[in-house]
Amino acid sequence: MTVTPLLEAVELSRAYGACVANERVSLALRAGRIHALVGENGAGKSTLCRMLFGLVRPDAGRILVDGRAVTLRSPRDAMAAGLGMVHQHFMLVDELTVAQNVVLGREPRRGGRMDLARAEAETAELAARFGLAVDPRAPVGGLAVGVQQRVEILKALHGGARVLLLDEPTAVLTAQEVDALLAVLRRLRDEGRAILVVTHKLPEVMAVSDEVTVLRQGRVVGRLDTAATSAVALSELMVGRHVDLSRRPRTTTPAEERLRVEDLVVRGPDGRARVNGVSLSVRAGEVVGIAGVEGNGQAELVEGLCGARSPASGRVVLCGQDVSRASVRRRRDAGLCHVPEDRLAQGLVPAMAVADNAVLGVHHRAPASRGGVLRRAGIAAAAQALVRAYDVRPADPALPVAALSGGNQQKVLVGRELSAGPRVVILAQPTRGVDVGAMERIHAAILAARDAGLAILLVSAELTELLALSDVIHVLYRGRIVHTVDAAAATVESLGPPMLGAGVAA
């Protein structure tokens, strides 16, 4: 007996001008199943989700709920049909509490006013039922990203969602938060909900999903039971070729020291030392990796090295110059470039064109300017070169960066920094939120930069990335380097204990 899907897309198509985002895409979500939707950045995954949730109207095709055709003119229509969506960029009101966000638009009333006590009780009950630990009275703006995501899921469940659509739900989560989220998704599946997880992280697909649909350039190129496939097979379907993310032999020998850090102490906004006596060295033609559970001082270390946060003590020596108190601009002029971990908040200006973003930070130098005046021809040429070299899609430098997928935004950012003529590059989470094809391209660019003689400090939450790219790996725990190892002798298993503080004196 065939079970009617709770939600079904039937040959949905959507185009933006000449750019076809989805072409005759079909997808069925069934009760008690987790369905993964995978594909390269820009393959059309988010557009499909937006059509299913009433944010975008399809040009052609049908959407069925419980086997009946529906017209979703807005998210309100979708929620009324039993659909809920957790967006990649959360739709929360920072000034409101957890409970107020959860019941927003469906506020319980008493005497003509919102019944806050009941809202908090309903939120607490839902949170306990699904293992989503939250404080109903906490202001959302002060919560960690992983907790904010729990609030988004609770919002959907409070609205009675039988179908949950999650767009890149693990893109900004720590490993521990990812494990907790996957456990919640399994619990929701076992209660009979249909779940769509849009992601590019294939290990998570293999760990949590029951079936997979693969998109490439807006079209379905594969529908598989997860148990009958592998991460390697899925990556080849996504990209259309074999993807190699393995460690590659170096072709050069590290040379002179380019970056030296001596007993660096950097304080956080609360005045506490987040980096506490860190010393390290990076040579030309070398990648030095920083491993650690997020929140152990990595962000403050990067800020202290780049000039975004002044160190409390210690020294930063760049190519022989003491830049411990130097500005960001002076450090860049001395040869330091930086890929920040949050591309939109710190690295790019979303409303500006790709071309303008491609020269940010070097706009005062040729070819972007001459005599203090911007040269549009020089900017256009630099942008075209970057778009070609990093396969940025769509290949139109006039588009605003906001129009690009996250992975293509990251290509612009990494390409800009590596093309700026640096001598030292600090990379913070350089492949966060990108698919395997873009990851392979970024990895190749990093290794090419290393072989060309750049000194690279790599901070990453992905241990497989650190092992593939690094020559030396330092483990950061509570702001201190507690373990250093030759990357060739390291494994994911050997790095785990020091990352959790095993063997570290209190």
Image (spheres, helix red, strand yellow):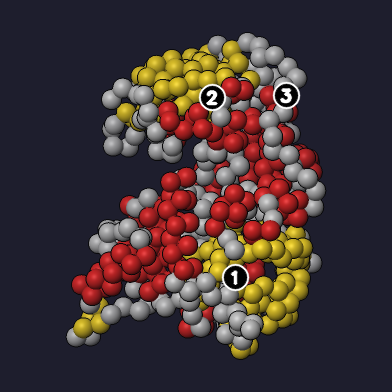
Choose top left, top right, bottom left or bottom right for residue 428: top right
Q: Residues within 10 Å of mark 1 (few under 14, many from 20)?
A: some
Whether residue 16 appears in this view of the structure is: yes
Q: Position of residue 222 (x, y in %)?
A: 74, 63
Residue 239 appearing in the image:
no
Q: Within 10 Å of the Cα at label 3, are there few (<14), some (14-19), or many (20+) other Cα atoms?
A: few
State how far apart marks 3 and 2 are (Cα): 16 Å
Q: Nearer the viewer, mark 1 or mark 3?
A: 3
Q: Are marks 1 and 3 in contact (CB under 8 Å)?
A: no
Residue closest to the eye, 308 or 504: 504
At horizontal 57% and vertical 45% (from top left) the residue drawn is 432
Relative to 210, 95 lies left or right: left
Identify the residue under disc 3: 249
Instruction: Identify the element where label 3 is drawn.
Output: loop
Of callouts 2 and 1, which one flags the residue occurring earlier in the amino acid sequence? 1
The structure residue drawn at horizontal position 49% and vertical position 65%, both measured from the top left corner, is 86
Between discs 1 and 3, the one toward the N terminus: 1
* Identity of the residue drawn at 43% across and 39% down: 294
Position of residue 147 relative to residue 74, above or below, is above
| Quadrant where the C terminus is found in the figure | top left
Residue 367, image x and y in percent?
74, 34
Distance from label 1 to label 3 (Cα)?
A: 43 Å
For the residues bearing labels 3 and 2, Cβ distance under 8 angstroms: no
Q: Secondary structure at mark 2?
A: strand
Q: Residue under circle 2?
A: 473
x%, y% of residue 342?
52, 44
Identify the residue position indicated by label 1 in the image.
50
Q: Amino acid at mark 2?
A: Ile
User: Is the N terminus in the top left, top right, bottom left or bottom right quadrant?
Assistant: bottom right
| Residue at x-position 65% and y-position 25% | 422
